[in-house]
Image (tube, grey):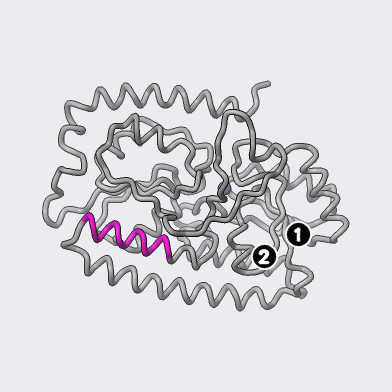
Amino acid sequence: MLSRTTLDRRSVVSGLAILASAAVAGSRSALAQAGASAPVAAGAPLPIVATFSILADFIAQVGGDRLALTSLVQAGADAHVYSPTPADARALVASRLIFINGLGFEGWVNRLIKSSATKATVVTATRSIVPLKAESKGGGHAHAGHDHGESDPHAWQSVANAKIYVANIEAALVAADPASAEIYRANARAYTGKLDALDAELRASIARIPTDRRKVITSHDAFQYFEKAYGISFISPRGVSTSAEPSPQAVGRIIRQIKAEKIPAVFLENISDQRLIQRIAQETGARVGGTLYSDALTPAGGPAPNYIAMMQHNMRQIVGALAVA
Ligand SMILES: [Zn+2]
């Protein structure tokens, strides 16, 4: 049987081959008109690409209707193991700015940018955030052929970091489109105020959970920043990427830990295979506390259509499972 990792790598390779030919085919039309030097007509929305839905939401909050915004990885999808499409390459070529998370999150993006030959400016939205180290999970993180870097990429999981994303986005939009600078500045200011309120709300919610119950199990290590900011311990059998299965030893260790420490709840994630967590719940008697949204938003109408709703939803699920009734 092919491992998931092998399948992913094969699809990335074939995806890049398609991209290369798409970029060549498109070079006579769209490519000729686009690129960083091409002026955007006054009043026309600025073409912008973000790699994933959470980052796209931050950008939309700052840019509003001044932007024509494309997210490469859609809501509900996993950006760790994404396979780019020819349409993605065309979006990069037509864009003025490409926002990436960085810290090794989008392992596929540098090759995509290179093969698309875009002239857009690439902005790393986590710039100046102090990254947490990725915890090694013995098989979950360090594996042959993939380099996820040393850092934990899920920096948006603390609201203090979200404010840094917003400041970086504001600076990049102001530089690219100075005529609308006042709009970007006002939007960033208003949204940062909402983030401050969110941070206070999350801290007040945590206070309802007894200290000895502030522990949850999730399927991959996406919540270290949340843990550090809000004081909930997240334990997972898999490393910071979803691209490899956890080792049986890592799963066994977690099962023993849940039993020994009487950890009350395990959580599903929207982007991860749910069977592993279901199995851990069965073997330990811990209850499944609900679904947490770690790396992607939900489509509109779901419980996490934007960043603030996502953080509120996650905290409600955690408090619901851990606070003593
Ligand atoms: Zn992740």
**At which x and y percent is residue 45?**
21, 53
Residue 325 against residue 306 in the figure, above or below: below
Q: Which residues are magenta?
A: 164-176
- The residue wearing badge 1 is 265
Where the C terminus falls, by quadrant? bottom right
The main secondary structure of the magenta stretch is helix
Q: CA distance from mark 2 to mark 1?
A: 9 Å
Looking at the rendered structure, the kind of residue marked 1 is Ala
Q: Which structural element holds mark 2?
A: helix
The residue located at (48%, 28%) in the rendering is: 12
Q: Are marks 2 and 1 in contact (CB under 8 Å)?
A: yes
**At which x and y percent is residue 60?**
34, 59
Residue 126 against residue 240 in the figure, above or below: below
Question: Is ligand 1 within 8 Å of the beta carbon of the residue shown at mark 1?
Answer: no
- The residue wearing badge 2 is 318
Looking at the rendered structure, the kind of residue marked 2 is Ile
The residue located at (62%, 29%) in the rendering is: 144
Residue 247 falls in image quadrant: top right
Where the N terminus falls, by quadrant? top right
Residue 248 against residue 169 in the figure, above or below: above
